[in-house]
Image: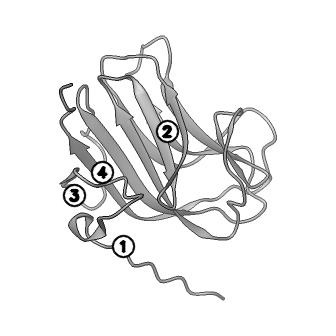
């Protein structure tokens, strides 16, 4: 059995190029509890270290949700199909997701209606999203509508939320 040890530097110690958390403030969570952390303005960021075992397919591992009752339930879903991380079932975000720990950062600029996805500190995808009255992050493993595997799993550690006020231009 393999043992995985992860070390995450504090946000202030990361610095440098390719650091998506630069300029953000950490949001205090009680025991990793995201409940009650809906947001409606500013720039918000999810950061987590994830692991998807080989064979897991047809799952969403990270999402940005809208409030219940909105025309669209989500503005972002990151799915894994056959080891490829995808924006919903479409654009490939990152290949080779199986059997490795990866750092996932998702930055949502509410005012600009944009989302950017970073894998291991490298920007891999960005898009405009449909505006909504509020949003919240989810992560884990959620079965999707096609190409599901018999066993589905994702593991997460060191999950953190960050926020900053949008810059005025």
| Number of the front mark, 2 or 1 | 1
In terms of sequence position, does the residue under pointer 4 or pointer 1 come before the other? 1
- Residue 9 vertical placement versus 152 (above, below): below
User: Disc 4 to disc 3, how far (Cα)?
Assistant: 12 Å
Tell me the number on the disc at residue 30.
3
The reply to whether discs 2 and 1 touch (Cβ–Cβ < 8 Å) is no
Residue situated in front as seen by the camera: 76 or 31: 76
Q: CA distance from mark 2 to mark 3?
A: 20 Å
**How many discs appear?**
4
53 horizontally vs 139: left or right: right
Task: Indicate which label's residue lies in the foreground, 1 or 3.
Answer: 1
Find residue 144 and report its image quarter. top right
**What secondary structure is found at the residue carrying circle 4?**
strand
Q: Nearer the viewer, mark 2 or mark 3?
A: 2
Rendered location of residue 155, percent (x, y)? 54, 64
In the rendered structure, which disc, 2 or 3, sits on the residue that comes first in sequence?
3
Residue at numbered disc 1 = 8
Q: Disc 1 or 3, which lies upstream in sequence? A: 1
Q: Which mark is residue 161?
A: 4
Task: Classify mark 3: helix, strand or loop.
Answer: loop
Q: Residues within 10 Å of mark 2 (few under 14, many from 20)?
A: many
Circles 2 and 3: CB atoms closer than 8 Å: no
Determine the residue positioned at 47% across, 83% down.
Answer: 5
Tell me if mark 3 has few (under 14), some (14-19) or many (20+) residues whose alpha carbon lies within 10 angstroms of its own: few
Which class describes the residues within 10 Å of circle 4: few (<14), some (14-19), or many (20+)?
A: many
**Residue tagged by mark 2?**
63
- x 72%, y 60%: residue: 96
Q: CA distance from mark 2 to mark 1?
A: 22 Å
Which badge, 2 or 4, is on the more N-terminal residue?
A: 2
């Amino acid at each position: 059995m393999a043992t995985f040890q992860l070390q995450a530097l504090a946000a202030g110690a990361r610095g440098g190029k390719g650091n998506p958390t630069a300029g953000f403030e950490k949001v205090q969570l009680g025991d990793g509890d995201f409940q009650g952390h809906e947001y409606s303005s500013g720039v918000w960021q999810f950061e987590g270290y994830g692991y998807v075992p080989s064979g897991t397919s047809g799952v969403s591992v990270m999402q940005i949700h809208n409030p219940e009752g909105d025309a669209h339930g989500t503005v972002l879903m990151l799915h894994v199909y056959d080891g490829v991380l995808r924006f919903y079932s479409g654009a490939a975000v990152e290949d080779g997701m199986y059997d490795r720990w990866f750092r996932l950062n998702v930055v949502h600029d509410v005012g600009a209606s944009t989302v950017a996805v970073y894998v291991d500190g490298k920007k891999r995808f960005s898009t405009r999203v449909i505006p909504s009255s509020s949003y919240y992050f989810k992560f884990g493993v959620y079965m999707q509508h096609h190409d599901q595997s018999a066993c589905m799993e994702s593991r997460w550690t060191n999950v953190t939320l960050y926020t900053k006020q949008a810059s005025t231009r």
